[in-house]
Amino acid sequence: MNQTHTARGATTRAESRQANTHWWDSDADHYHEEHGEFLGEVRLRWCPEGLTEEEAGLLGPVAGKRILEIGCGSASSSRWLRTQGAEVVATDLSAGMLRHAVAGNNHSGVRIPLALADAECLPFRDGVFDVIFTAFGAVPFVADSALVMREAARVLRPGGRWVFSVTHPMRWIFPDDPGEAGLVAIHSYFDRRPYVEYTDGVPTYVEHHRTLGDRVREIVAAGLTLVDIVEPEWPEGHTQEWGQWSPLRGKIFPGTAIYVTTKPE
């Protein structure tokens, strides 16, 4: 029988990449069974709080823009942008997730180009996109998220926009629990060791923590300008839990941080 356990410990870039590629390949079906209805086939939701791009407008005007989504999952966000007149390409590291993206293209009739790609090494020329974004894709799962910021800046044209959502950094203080146990702080905010799930001693899932200051410094070091940090509030009447996200916790402290950045002209 396989032995599994979780811990906070260092992992290399290669270990993170291998673990999360395998995880999302193997979990893609279960993930969409659990969250597919909430995400939709043609909809851009930024977070478990339910905030949509239609409501928030964080990407700015998109009609006629060339847009790249990284960590696209089933690519429902990119399909929504296509219906708004954008020219969109969607990428993911997981072939399992892209299989669902192909199915979503076919079922919805809104077809967008898809590519298997690593966010730490994007297969595009410099300055070819007007907008780049990801909703909980790529950024939390790579060991070198500063490199993702540099890659986004590289393929973004001057004046373009890079927007990404991640778990709010203060959530790392608390247990990964949607109930009352998740309201008690037990971890150091400054402990940057990643959360790792192991099977027989081998990392099988890795998620990385950065403080608010860390993230801002990554953005600035990539030559980008931070425009806003959006912390969506839990909306009234929203009762759906998603992992550690719940109405109980959402009414007390934020679960998501959305960073809005631009590349200087």
Image: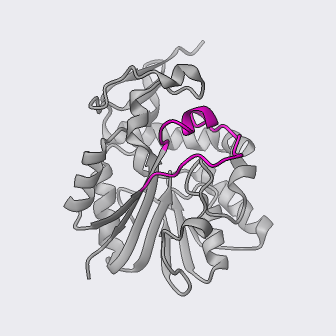
Q: Is residue 123 visible?
A: no
Q: Position of residue 69 (x, y in %)?
A: 50, 65
Where residue 242 appears, x then y in whole percent? 63, 38
Q: Residue at x 62, y 39 (%)?
A: 26
Query: Would residue 107 be counted in the magenta stretch?
Result: no
Q: State the residue in front, 160 or 12.
A: 160
Q: Position of residue 104 (x, y in %)?
A: 72, 62
Determine whether, in the image, residue 23 is placed left or right of residue 18: right
Image position of 200 with respect to 153: above or below:
above
User: Hey, which residue is sitting farthest right in the picture?
Assistant: 107
Q: Quadrant of the N terminus?
A: top right
Residue at image x 46%, y 21%? 184
Residue at far left of view? 221
- Which image quarter is the C terminus in? bottom left
Near-viewer residue (38 or 119): 38
- Rendering coords of residue 61 (x, y %): 51, 81
Residue in view at x 57 percent, y 81 percent: 86
Magenta region's main secondary structure? Answer: loop
* Magenta-drawn segment: 230-255
**Front residue of this view, candidates 36 and 123:** 36
Asked if residue 244 is among those painted magenta in the image, a careful observer would answer yes
Task: Classify 46 as above or below 59.
Answer: above
Q: Quadrant of residue 35?
A: top right
All told, the count of numbered labels is 0
Q: Residue at x 26, y 67 (%)?
A: 224
